[in-house]
Structure formats: C-alpha cells, structure tokens
Image: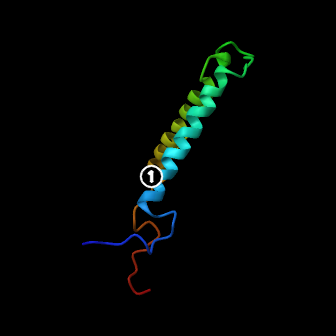
Amino acid sequence: MNESHHDDHWLARPATIKLLWRVFAAVLVLLVLAQAVIYVKGYFGVDGWFGFAAAYGFLSCLAMVLFAKALGYVLKRDEDYYDDGNSDA
C-alpha cells in the first residue's frame, strides 16, 4: 500500500494541493488586509465596511453552490428516465 504520487500530474499531488491552498489563503488574507491601507469608498454604507468584499464574495459563492445543489434535486430524473421499457434495443 505504499503508493507513489510521483507519477501523478503535479497538480494532482497532495503536497502540491496543500501548497496551493496555503498560497491562495495567504493571498486572500493579504488582499483583505490591504483594505486597512487602501481607502475603499462605500456607495451604500455597508459596502465600505472592512472586509465587506471578501465576505460578500464568499457568501455569494456559497449561495450559488447551494442554489445549484437544490436545482440539481429539482431537475434530477430517474436512471431509467430515457428507457422506453423495451429491452430489445
């Protein structure tokens, strides 16, 4: 059971995936912290809050995923939906 991940594509290796998660998380943290230095003018009051864009983006993405999941349940069909019941085909 000593599998080698050396033959996998470099993006499929667990070490690379872990590194990419850390790099992306660091970039996101730096972008949110940049708002402490860079003035962001809010047009609606709430959009001027610290970290609003990050929270709005995360919540929007979460809403899209949940909506897609619910839509999948609504549009899902049985496995034999296109089967006409004739096994001679």
Q: Nearer the viewer, residue 79 or 9?
A: 9
- In the picture of the structure, the residue carrying the numbered disc 1 is 18
Instruction: Report x, y in % for residue 16.
Output: 48, 58
Q: Residue at x 61, y 23 (%)?
A: 52
Instruction: Report x, y in % for residue 24.
Output: 55, 44
- Considering only vertical position in the picture, is 12 above or below 47? below
Q: Residue at x 47, y 64 (%)?
A: 12
Q: Residue at x 52, y 63 (%)?
A: 11
Is any part of residue 60 visible from this angle?
A: no
Q: How many marks?
A: 1
Is any part of residue 62 visible from this angle?
A: yes
Instruction: Report x, y in % for residue 39.
Output: 73, 19
Q: Nearer the viewer, residue 42 or 67?
A: 42
Which residue reaches farthest bottom? 88
Q: Quadrant of residue 26?
A: top right
- Left/right placement of residue 8 relative to residue 4 reads right
Q: What is the quadrant of the N terminus in the image?
A: bottom left
Kind of residue sitting beneath label 1:
Lys
- Left/right placement of residue 64 relative to residue 48 reads left
Q: Secondary structure at mark 1?
A: helix
Q: Residue at x 60, y 33 (%)?
A: 30
Q: What is the quadrant of the C terminus in the image?
A: bottom left
- Graded by Cα atoms within 10 Å as few (under 14), some (14 to 19) or many (20 or more), the crowding at tag 1 reads few
